[in-house]
Image (cartoon, helix red, strand yellow):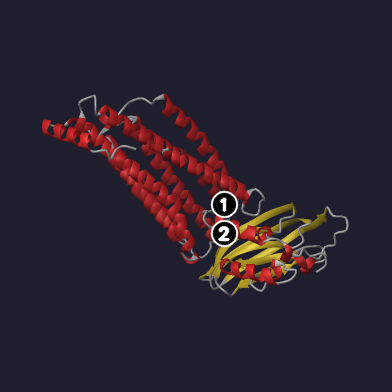
């Protein structure tokens, strides 16, 4: 292999495949819905390794790949291309350590020639017109990453790549990875649950229409957008499963996901401020918080669309992932402030307005709300990712089920505790309850934050 870079001489942190493994760790924790038939254009790309996608294969998995428009160029005048130094491979996550060990002891190591990868083809196998069409039956079920390796990174490569990955189930092509074929039914089930949830909420609001406020209308709108997002997710996954592409359902999914995300954070913030529940207005700091959260949610959804539609083969894909995660963390932290403000305000009011029992009940509810919000965000952002990292690829649907299940419990808690009621229990308090509550507030410091 003439002019092949000697990776053995590079420090470990400069090994290109080590950078890929770090990227794969990040990618594996981010749920992404992509079509499994892809057309990707690579232009003047010199990255040593380009990740195209991850796919879980069953016992009868197939991968079809074709490339055309292949060309390369080098900024080094005397560089000589060795076509055997470029090609497509399949990587198992379990093989990363073995490849790393092999690179430390092999001279002139090239990842596409490793003993621990499944080689699809090298550029030396290209047809005279610089095209390739081929397919491979994956006889060892596992989750694989499709990677393009370039062991001569002084060369920039341009090509158009078409891939199709699928499993054969009951004689039919299934373009969803093994472990995700249950998603269409799962999302449809939760769509039905949220539809019933919305009908019940409308019935409650009609029955208690005298006490319905704007916040209750917004909560109903949240249920609508959540249900619409789920039915679009179900249809999206269903079309990908059968045809390999979402047929436009991904666009509807992004639209309703956008409105659902904005409504969810807005409702949490408004409830946390006590709007329509304790006071009919928003303070200036609360308005400013909303003016920060809403644009951040817009940017987060833009990042989500770019992540979902571009795929990991794009140079800036990981950057957009980092932006997405950063914005999500900021939004999650921001929603705690209005809840803390409300708890402190109630705590201070309890010392001056003579309504200890009423304030104690509200304090208890807002403390519970704070704990539930923390638990919900912690579970959906951290626990679910941790479970997805350890569960077998065949059971990835469990993480989706856990995410939706916890979300449903969270919604039920909010809607039950902040529903419109005709007789507010905080106004039906006798003197003994008032005295007991005053003493409890005097002795209990558990609401201090």
Q: Quadrant of the C terminus?
A: top left
* Label placed on residue 232: none
**Residue 243, disc:** 2
Q: Name the spot of residue 201 as percent of width and height, x first.
A: 31, 41
Q: Position of residue 226 (x, y in %)?
A: 42, 45
Q: Residues within 10 Å of mark 1 (few under 14, many from 20)?
A: few
Residue at 64% x, 72% y: name it. Answer: 116
Say whether residue 246 is visible: yes
In this view, 63 is above or below 22: below
Rendered image quadrant of residue 433: top left
Could you say which is closer to the camera, residue 241 or residue 145?
145
Relative to the observer, which residue lies in front, 112 or 119? 112
In front of the other: 23 or 166: 23
Residue drawn 43% across the image and 38% down it: 265
Query: Is 299 left or right of 52, judged from the image as shown?
Result: left
94 horizontally vs 110: left or right: left
Q: Quadrant of residue 361?
A: top left
Mark 1 to mark 2 CA distance (whole Å): 9 Å
Q: Which quarter of the figure has residue 159?
A: bottom right
Find disc 1 in the rendering and name its residue. 247
Give the secondary structure at mark 2: helix
As drawn, which residue projects farthest toward the right?
A: 78
Whole-percent x and y of residue 43? 74, 51
Task: Answer whether labels 1 and 2 touch (C-beta < 8 Å).
Answer: yes
Q: Looking at the picture, how far across and down is residue 227, in whole percent? A: 41, 46
Q: Quadrant of the N terminus?
A: bottom right
Q: Is residue 64 left or right of residue 213?
A: right
Q: Nearer the viewer, residue 367 or 255?
A: 367
């Amino acid at each position: 292999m003439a002019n092949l870079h000697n990776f053995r001489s590079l420090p470990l942190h400069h090994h290109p495949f080590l950078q890929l493994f770090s990227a794969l760790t990040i990618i594996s924790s981010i749920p992404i819905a992509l079509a499994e038939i892809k057309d990707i254009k690579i232009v003047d790309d010199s990255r040593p390794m380009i990740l195209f996608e991850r796919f879980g294969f069953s016992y009868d998995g197939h991968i079809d790949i074709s490339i055309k428009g292949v060309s390369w160029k080098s900024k080094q005048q005397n560089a000589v291309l060795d076509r055997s130094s470029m090609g497509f491979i399949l990587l198992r996550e379990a093989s990363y350590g073995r490849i790393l060990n092999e690179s430390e002891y092999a001279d002139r190591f090239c990842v596409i020639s490793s003993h621990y990868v499944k080689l699809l083809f090298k550029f030396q196998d290209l047809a005279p017109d610089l095209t390739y069409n081929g397919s491979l039956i994956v006889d060892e079920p596992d989750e694989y990453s499709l990677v393009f390796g370039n062991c001569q990174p002084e060369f920039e490569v341009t090509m158009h790549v078409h891939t199709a990955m699928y499993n054969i189930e009951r004689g039919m092509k299934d373009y969803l990875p093994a472990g995700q074929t249950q998603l269409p039914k799962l999302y449809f089930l939760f769509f039905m649950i949220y539809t019933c949830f919305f009908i019940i909420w409308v019935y409650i609001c009609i029955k208690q229409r005298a006490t319905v406020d704007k916040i209750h209308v917004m909560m109903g709108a949240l249920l609508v957008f959540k249900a619409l997002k789920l039915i679009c997710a179900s249809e999206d996954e269903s079309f990908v499963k059968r045809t390999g592409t979402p047929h436009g359902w991904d666009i509807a999914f992004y639209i309703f996901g956008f409105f659902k995300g904005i409504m969810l954070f807005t409702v949490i913030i408004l409830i946390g401020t006590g709007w329509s529940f304790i006071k009919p207005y928003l303070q200036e700091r609360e308005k400013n918080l909303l003016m920060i959260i809403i644009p951040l949610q817009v940017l987060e959804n833009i990042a989500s669309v770019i992540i979902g539609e571009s795929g990991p083969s794009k140079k800036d894909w990981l950057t957009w992932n980092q932006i997405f995660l950063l914005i999500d963390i900021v939004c999650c932290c921001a929603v705690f402030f209005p809840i803390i403000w409300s708890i402190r305000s109630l705590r201070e009011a309890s010392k001056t307005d003579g309504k200890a029992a009423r304030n104690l009940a509200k304090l208890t509810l807002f403390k519970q709300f704070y704990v539930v919000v923390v638990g919900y965000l912690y579970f959906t952002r951290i626990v679910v990712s941790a479970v997805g990292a350890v569960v077998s690829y065949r059971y990835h649907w469990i993480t989706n089920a856990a995410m939706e299940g916890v979300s449903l419990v969270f919604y039920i808690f909010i809607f039950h505790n902040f529903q419109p009621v005709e007789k507010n229990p905080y106004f039906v308090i006798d003197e003994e309850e008032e005295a007991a509550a005053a003493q409890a507030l005097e002795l209990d410091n558990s609401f201090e934050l």
